[in-house]
Amino acid sequence: MKTLRQSIRIQRRLISSSDREKFAKQLLSQIQKLANFQHGQKIALYLPNDGEIDTKYIQNFLKNRGFSIYLPILVGKSLKFAK
């Protein structure tokens, strides 16, 4: 029996690249409406993998507003963040 994670991964892979692009832009639109994203701070994002939504539009939006962007890195069993 497949785990939930495997099932979601399979569903994600079925999304077309044009739909993924559309969803990435829709996500940016939603983030732009949030008041907390108006001024520079520190924020963590991921690099897309295995059909995940691309965060490049969000990264550009936040960088242009002075945010410092950090990426998660696994170090052994610990999760660290690097700029």
Image (cartoon, grey):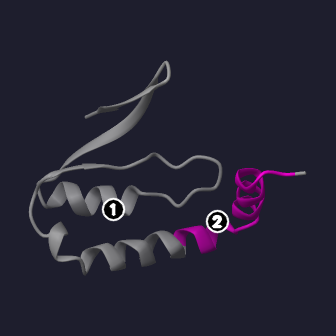
Tag 1 residue: 58
Does residue 7 appear left or right of residue 59 in this picture?
right
Residue, x 10% and y 57% (percent of image)?
A: 40
Tag 2 residue: 17
User: Looking at this view, is 37 or 18 the one in front?
Assistant: 37
Residue, x 52% and y 49% (percent of image)?
A: 48
Q: Quick check: 43 above or below 76?
A: below
Residue, x 69% and y 62% (percent of image)?
A: 12
How far from the left and from the top, in percent, is residue 81? 32, 33
| Residue kind at label 2, given as amino acid type | Ser
* Residue 80 part of the magenta-drawn span: no
User: Looking at this view, is 20 or 78 the one in front?
Assistant: 78
Q: Which residues are magenta?
A: 2-21
Q: Earlier in the sequence, mark 1 or mark 2?
A: 2
The quadrant the C terminus occupies is top left
Q: CA distance from mark 1 to mark 2?
A: 17 Å
